[in-house]
């Protein structure tokens, strides 16, 4: 597969996710690293998970998705950033349109079990939350992240970052899953750079966030208690 961009493992190492700049998301289910992961192991890349004659998916079964992106139903998109919820509940994507005129941050819940309609392709991801991003710094990758507890998202936004939540109370994702996809809530916006912010990261051990911009400056933020 061409145009590979990012690869992540779920915390329990049961899934490997690989994103591409052509808008595809590859998921290896029931990951077994003792078996071959070479391309030759997959005679066909299918849009649904392969199953054995017993109805049980084999180890390292491959699923190829084109995740739903708001506003991009009729056009392709590029998945530039890929992160996983620290508890393995969801995946976080930063997507841009092929024409680079829109950017989105999207959260997708992992769905387990058989598809509702056996004849339809299986889809392991469901779009739960999204927000449109500032369309600046075209052509550059913007890296976003979950907080260590998974309650907040830090996302580059123009010359700063936005802290996003699933609701205004920064609740756990599992406590506020909507029936239909809904917007992420902006908890706080932080702007301290003179250039486009390309990356942001929560400290895993301290109440601190870092952001880095195109000109090489790094800013650190911590709350006032």
Image (spheres, grey):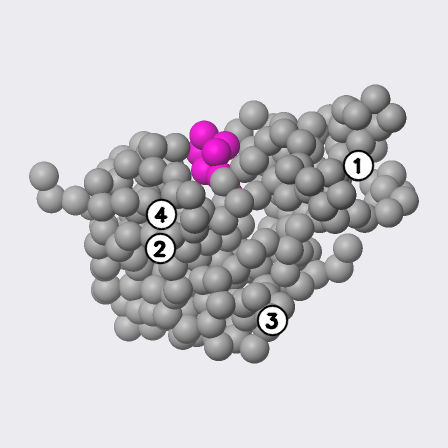
Residue that badge 2 annotates: 183
Q: For the residue labelled by badge 3, is the local secondary structure a helix, a strand or a loop?
A: loop
Marked residue nearer the N-terminal end (3 or 4):
3
Residue 91 on the magenta span: yes
Q: Residues within 10 Å of mark 3 (few under 14, many from 20)?
A: few
Marked residue nearer the N-terminal end (1 or 2):
1
Determine whether label 4 and label 2 are within 8 Å by CB. Answer: no
Residue that badge 1 annotates: 50
Q: Magenta stretch?
A: 83-92
CA gap, disc 4 and disc 1: 33 Å
CA gap, disc 3 and disc 4: 26 Å
Q: Position of residue 117 (x, y in %)?
A: 69, 40
Query: Which residue occupies 77% across, 24% down?
Result: 56
Quarter of the figure with residue 72: bottom right
Residue placed furthest toward the left: 225
Is residue 209 found left or right of 173 in the rendered image?
left
Q: How crowded is mark 4: few (under 14 residues within 10 Å), some or many (20 or more)?
A: many
Residue that badge 4 annotates: 153
Above or below residue 105? Residue 123 is above
Q: For the residue labelled by badge 1, is the local secondary structure a helix, a strand or a loop?
A: loop
Marked residue nearer the N-terminal end (4 or 1):
1
Query: Which residue occupies 48% across, 77% down?
Result: 101
Q: For the residue labelled by badge 2, is the local secondary structure a helix, a strand or a loop?
A: strand
Residue placed furthest toward the top: 54
Query: Which residue occupies 24% across, 64% down?
Result: 191
Residue that badge 3 annotates: 75
Q: Where is residue 67 in the image (x, y as percent from the top left)?
A: 59, 54
Q: Residues within 10 Å of mark 1 (few under 14, many from 20)?
A: some
CA gap, disc 4 and disc 2: 13 Å
Query: Which residue occupies 85% across, 42% down?
Result: 42
């Amino acid at each position: 597969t061409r145009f590979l961009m990012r690869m992540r493992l779920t915390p329990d190492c049961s899934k490997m996710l690989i994103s591409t700049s052509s808008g595809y998301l590859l998921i290896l289910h029931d990951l077994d690293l003792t078996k071959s992961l070479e391309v030759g192991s997959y005679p066909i890349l299918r849009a649904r998970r392969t199953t054995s004659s017993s109805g049980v998916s084999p180890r390292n079964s491959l699923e190829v998705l084109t995740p739903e992106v708001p506003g991009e139903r009729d056009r392709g998109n590029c998945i530039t950033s890929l992160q996983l919820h620290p508890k393995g509940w969801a995946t976080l994507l930063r997507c841009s349109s092929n024409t680079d005129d829109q950017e989105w941050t999207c959260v997708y819940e992992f769905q387990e079990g058989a598809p509702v309609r056996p004849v339809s392709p299986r889809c392991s991801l469901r779009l739960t939350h999204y927000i449109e991003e500032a369309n600046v710094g075209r052509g550059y990758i913007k890296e976003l992240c979950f907080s260590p507890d998974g309650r907040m998202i830090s996302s580059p936004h123009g010359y700063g970052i936005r802290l996003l939540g699933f609701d205004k109370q920064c609740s756990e994702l599992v406590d506020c899953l909507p029936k239909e996809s809904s917007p992420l809530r902006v908890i706080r916006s932080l702007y301290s750079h003179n250039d486009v912010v390309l990356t942001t990261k929560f400290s895993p051990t301290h109440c601190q966030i870092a952001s880095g911009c195109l000109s090489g400056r790094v800013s650190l933020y911590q709350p006032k208690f």
